[in-house]
Image (cartoon, rainbow, N blue to C red):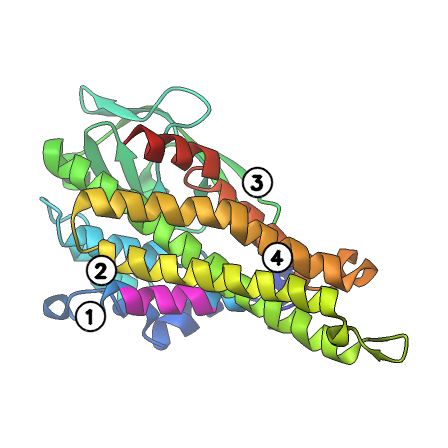
Amino acid sequence: RHPWKEPAARRAAGDPAATWRELAELGWFAMAVPEELGGLGADAHRCLLILQEAGRVMLDAPVMTTLLIAPRLAAGAEGPALPTLLEGAAAGDVRFALVTGPGRGAPLRVADGRLQGTSALAVGAAEATHWLVVADGVLLCLNAAATPAGREDLRLIDGRAASFLHFDAVPVSDEALVATGDAAARLAEEAAALAIAGTVADALGALSAGIDRTTVYLRERRQFGQPLAAFQAVQHLMADSYCEMEGLASLLLWLGAALDGDPAERRRAAATAKIFLGRQGLAAVSRCIQVTGGMGMAEEYPIGHVFKRLQTAAALFGTADHHLHHLAAG
């Protein structure tokens, strides 16, 4: 599939199941799985590089939870619900989606063995075989097909699929428990940082591809007898975008290292990267639209879809203002 097609055209042209199988054959979903469980035991940096390349080609498949989050949470799981599924995930047969709160209604909580509440937007929930549910004081791994949850499906502005999940006193078996109490709280915090890291990596890949494509356009497009790239004003705008892209890359490196370090530093790194993405990252891709003029506003031209990808990334897992408030609060 051509990576620069409009999202609806990409969905129509491809087979999601075949795409997932192909990615599994490449070893994507075995990367973060520990070696003792049959995986490759890759660290966070290597997984983030894969997610960065997924963003570069505007991949629609919601791979982040299966590739990065589920294997790392499995290492701290109290029960076997999650670790036993990793072999199937590595083979491409199991697909995870991260389900968190708070949503638009009641927060997710388990009381008397029943799950209640409404999730936040869960990317890829409709395509997942299992949901990793972060509820109040508990982490669950639910079989999507066997869980009687209401699901409100929608398309995000960048074309990816997401859902709100509604749980109305859904019974939770002991086999579905991944962790409870303090262990669940630690894993929930780790899952939040991993989700931000994966989202930033995807956005960085999309931004890099957008800047590359814009640079090619500026060298080829001529105005007043010379390429647009020769104009100093255009050069300054693109230099600013390049510096902001490199700044985001540096923050992602910090976050990748912090994922295995002190939780307080991990929170700071995640918040800082998300703030930078929501402000400087969006500014960088906005300049690409500016310098390409009317062409940049055309639906058929890729830079607008990169902008939508970054807008979506900036909104998922907390906006820049949300993280700035919490970072300032200490």
Circle 1 residue: 39
Task: State which region is magenta.
Answer: 45-53
Crowd tier of the residue under label 3, counting other residues whose Cα lies within 10 Å: few below 14, some 14–19, many 20 or above:
some
Does residue 159 appear anywhere in the picture? Answer: no
Residue type marked 4: Val
Q: Are marks 4 and 1 in contact (CB under 8 Å)?
A: no
Residue 41, image x, y percentages: 18, 69
Earlier in the chain: of badge 4 and badge 2, it is 2
Horizontal side, residue 138 vs residue 281: left or right: left
Q: Residue at x 19, y 32 (%)?
A: 138
**Secondary structure of residue under mark 3:** strand
The x and y percentages for residue 117 are: 36, 23
- Three-letter amino acid code at disc 2? Leu
In this rendering, the answer to whether 46 lies above or below 202 is below
**Label at residue 75:** none
Q: Residues within 10 Å of mark 1 (few under 14, many from 20)?
A: some
Mark linked to residue 86: 2
The residue sitting at the front extreme is: 232
Front residue of 51/269: it is 269
Q: Earlier in the sequence, mark 3 or mark 1?
A: 1
Q: Amino acid at mark 1?
A: Gly
**Figure check: 196 above or below 224:** above
Residue 330: x and y in percent read 27, 32
The disc labelled 3 sits on which kind of residue?
Leu
**Left or right of 224 in this view: 96:** left
